[in-house]
Image (cartoon, helix red, strand yellow):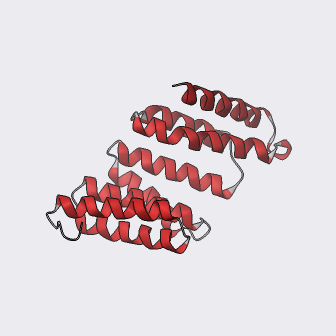
Amino acid sequence: EAEITLHELAFNYFLQRMERARLEERLPDDEASCFYHLEALRIPLIERREWGRIRQYVRRLREAQPQQAHHLHLLSLYEGVNAIRTQSYQAGEEILRGLIADTTAIAEIHMRALNVLAQSYWFQTQYDRALESYQQAHTLATTIENQTFQAHTLLNMSMVYHEIGYYLQG
């Protein structure tokens, strides 16, 4: 709980600095720091299934008009994740497919979006589509040499294979 509180305080501090400054006077480090702390909050809030809190942070940050393209992509990713996790599958999938198609987004964003898209398919028992998206995420993770995400996607694929009774593939 102390970790969440610390990151929330820092997130709010940098967000207030962004909100108070005019766009042309903003410090890029304030925006970067705000996103750093939002990313640090993401995992514990997802573990606690605090979708409303995540949605609130994303909304407030979007209203502050971040300027860096990567940060706008992250906000879209968070919106897609939140939609999927609250069973708004169609809306979430639309957001994620838009991110995947966006050639200006970095490979890590594409990889993460593919992973969440695969989760959406898995939750809806669309196993073939889930496996295809996990495989695409794994290929990207391999390309950008993200070993943690390679393992993550392999684990997710094995769980889908297990669920459909293909134990040897899993």
What residue is at 16 percent from the left and 62 percent from the top? 164
Of all residues, the one furthest to the left in this rendering is: 165
Of all residues, the one furthest to the right in this rendering is: 25
- Pick the front one: 134 or 28: 134
Provide residue 28's location: percent of width, then percent of height.
Answer: 78, 47
What residue is at 60 percent from the left and 29 percent from the top? 8
- Pick the front one: 159 or 42: 159
- Is 165 left, or right, of 26 in this rendering? left
Residue 51, above or below 142: above
Residue 58, above or below 118: above
Provide residue 45's location: percent of width, then percent of height.
Answer: 46, 35
Q: Residue 145, located in which quarter of the rendered image?
A: bottom right
- Is 143 left, or right, of 30 in this rendering? left
Number of numbered markers: 0
What residue is at 33 percent from the left and 51 percent from the top? 89
Q: Residue 36, located in which quarter of the rendered image?
A: top right
- Pick the front one: 61 or 32: 32
Residue 142, above or below 151: below
User: Which quarter shows the C terminus?
Assistant: bottom left
Provide residue 129's location: percent of width, then percent of height.
Answer: 29, 67
Provide residue 66's location: percent of width, then percent of height.
Answer: 69, 47
